[in-house]
Amino acid sequence: MELASREVEPVSLPAMTGRPGVLRNKLFYGIGAVAFGVKDNGFQILLLLYYNRVLGLQASLVGLAILAALIVDAFIDPKIGFWSDRIRSRFGRRHPFMYAAALPASLSYLLLFLPPAHLSKWPLFTYLLITSVLTRICISFYEIPSSALAPELTSQYDERTSFAGYRYFFGWTGGLSMTLLAFSVFLNYQPGQAIAILDPIGFRKYGIAAAVLMFISTLVSAFGTQAAVRPEPGQLYYETPRIKILQELRNIFSNRSALSAILSSKLMLLATGLSFALGTYFNIYAWGLSPREIAILTGGLFFSAMAALAVAPWVTRRFDKRGATLRAAVLLFFLLPFPLELSLAGHFPTRASGVMIPFLLIYNMAVTALLVLVPILLSSMLVDVVEDIEVQTGLRQEGVIYAINTFIAKFATGLAVFLSTVILTLSHFPDNGQMTEINARVINLMSEYYVGALLLLYAGAIVTTYTYSITRERHAQNLQTLAARHKLQAVTTEP
């Protein structure tokens, strides 16, 4: 492998949509998100519960460790994207990273759930910090190049939404599968245990199973997409001048649509991460659900992911990407805090009524379909930024753009857990892992802070999404401009 060392004009990779095997490409591209989905769900749903309620580490320290790991991400992720845009090898630009990261990403995630026994407060905090940093770095080396394959696989406006749909469908189903296994198998009730959900052995078993799934999915995706992006005879990879990463980041953030998609993604994913991080606490301590009941609610979410995958291309054709995202975000603004608003008003259905579980199941399925749909649309919007920036600057920056996108997703996960710990602290939620019942006043305080945070985040996301300006027509114009530019380049460079 060698890095590009000379400056040449950018040459775009041709779209793969018209070639045979498009569905195959979508499937293998989508499978690549399983590892990221498992990691995301683990960080959002299980990690805080494990270190706070099981191992007894203060919630504020758990949040601090995860937030500190984000600082490392801020420096590492753009460099990974920068490198993957430039590297040259017989495997292409992206795949060397994907192959190399598969095992380290899986092992580092496993270590999160295998802390040495009987660690005291600060050693446990240090262990969580180190393993969180390792996990995030290793995942970045896989996820950024893997997700950056999308613009090379297709240039068509609606087809990109379909590719993004497959990516998020597999990410969500992978994460949900491991969450379902956690609550239905690894953390389910065992004879002689008062509450198996606080059993550390169950979390360790989950970590092993999750690591195996991550390793298999990353390699399957890497091998499956290899042929789709291998250069053909006469095909050139584009090369870019050796300019500073900060300049490339400036190119991206000076594009209004790129900035809109990035900020909207951050706010919406932050709200989603907050709902996941505190959702388990509400399921256990507000609704009094057992692990089996949580597993039932989780199982219903697979239908939500399938619904989002099916409807995503249709809504972009019907409303355009920005219009579809705005409509979904407005619905989430009203729906996401609805059960807790009912509870605060004293109208939430009781367990004795027999309505509570069906109500939560239907509600979770509807909301989750929207929570899957929104990032699909935002990811597709961000893909279209690639050509918009190339028209402006002459550079294709898929790797850097997807590095930003990956960092946003991890930033939302980490910051959501941190904000969750802030809410737990402000609500005076106890850190004693042996307590299984929490005072109603604490639950009400949690609900008030949580609902307020969700409404603020979605209000901001709706405003920022409105400023996105790449329509179907503008994307088509960008492609025509680039085609003409590359045709002229080919003519002028002929001997």
Image (tube, rainbow, N blue to C red):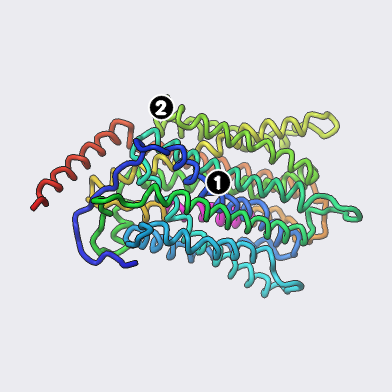
Pinpoint residue 258: horizontal percent, then vertical percent.
Answer: 36, 46
Residue at the outermost left position? 495
Can the viewer see residue 70 in this picture? no
> Which residue is found at the position 63% from the left and 37% from the top?
302
166 or 337, nearer to the observer: 166
Pinpoint residue 137: horizontal percent, then vertical percent.
Answer: 50, 64
Q: Secondary structure at mark 1?
A: helix
190 or 76, nearer to the observer: 190
> Which residue is found at the position 39% from the left and 40% from the top?
381
Pinpoint residue 440: horizontal percent, then vertical percent.
Answer: 79, 46
> In which image quadrant can residue 471 be found?
top left
Q: Looking at the picture, does residue 336 appear above or below residue 48?
A: above
The magenta region covers 404-420
User: Number of callouts in the render?
Assistant: 2
413 or 292, nearer to the observer: 292
> Which residue is found at the position 32% from the left and 46% from the top?
386
Pinpoint residue 56: horizontal percent, then vertical percent.
Answer: 75, 64
Is residue 487 located in the magenta-colored stretch of the structure?
Answer: no
Amino acid type, callout 2: Arg
The residue identified by callout 2 is 317
Is residue 419 located in the magenta-colored stretch of the structure?
Answer: yes
Residue at the outermost top position? 318
Circle 2 or circle 1, nearest the eye: 1
The residue identified by callout 1 is 171
Q: Residues within 10 Å of mark 1 (few under 14, many from 20)?
A: many
Quadrant of the rendering where the N terminus is positioned: bottom left
Q: Looking at the picture, does residue 171 appear above or below residue 312?
A: below
Amino acid type, callout 1: Gly
Can the viewer see residue 78 in this picture? yes
Q: Which mark is residue 231?
A: none
Q: Main secondary structure of the magenta part?
A: helix
